[in-house]
Image: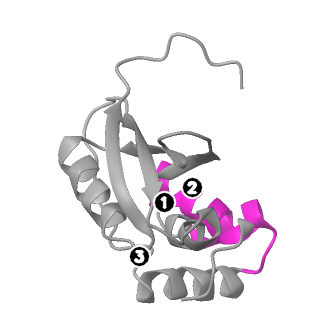
Amino acid sequence: MKTLDATDRKLIALLQDNARLPTVALARAVGLSRSAVQERIQRLERSGVIAQYTLRLGKGDPLQAWLLLRHAEGFSCDDVMPLLQTLPQVSLCQSVVGETDLMVLVETAGSGELSDLRERIAAFKGVDDVTTVPVLRTVLDRR
């Protein structure tokens, strides 16, 4: 699988917001032709980055969680990041010092998806341990 570029990530984000966006609207948003966007989406589907299109009921907020990763011996962020970049649920990664090597902010539709995502990341080559810290509420965000 080719590494996701900024255009792939933008397409994924647009489709996460509205999976019914017409290809022409997607193309306009990312500055590519309709056919180039269709090819990218097909590649993302074939590679499994886009697994399915689904319906989400209600207006509920996504479940956010921090996944605190510890690298396996001999591995680093450079080894793990290409794998994390393929996951559309991953919204932020921060390399830190201490017991934790990498803090990964994820957004999922619920606890079942969070559990599946956590297990998938824990199985990545180069990941020794994952601690899951669900976010109860955001009390300040100045980003």
Q: Position of residue 33 (x, y in %)?
A: 76, 80
Q: Quadrant of the N terminus?
A: bottom right
For discs 3 and 2, the disc positioned in front in the rendered view: 3
Is mark 1 in CB contact (under 8 Å) with mark 2?
yes
Query: Which residue corresponds to mark 1?
Result: 88
Q: Main secondary structure of the magenta part?
A: helix
Mark 2, residue position: 13
The residue at the point 34 percent across, 20 percent down is 136
* Disc 3 packing (10 Å; few <14; some 14–19; many ≥20): few
Indicate whether residue 108 is drawn in magenta: no
Which residue has dot 3 on it? 125
From this view, report whether residue 9 is shown above or below residue 104. Answer: below
Marks 3 and 1 sit apart, C-alpha to C-alpha, by: 19 Å
Residue type beneath disc 2? Ala
- Say whether residue 38 is left or right of residue 72: right
User: Residue drawn at (66%, 60%), measured in percent from left and top?
Assistant: 10
The residue that appears at 62% across and 42% down in the rendered structure is: 96
Quarter of the image with the C terminus in it: top right
Question: Which residue is the extreme one toward the right?
Answer: 31
In terms of depth relative to the viewer, which is nearer, 91 or 121? 121
Front: mark 1 or 2: 1
Magenta-span inclusion, residue 17: yes
Specify which label sits upstream in the sequence, 3 or 2: 2
**Earlier along the polypeptide chain: callout 1 or callout 2?**
2
Part of the protein shown in magenta: 7-33
Percent across and percent down for residue 12 are 55, 63
Residue sitting at x 61%, y 62%? 77
Image-quadrant location for residue 7: bottom right
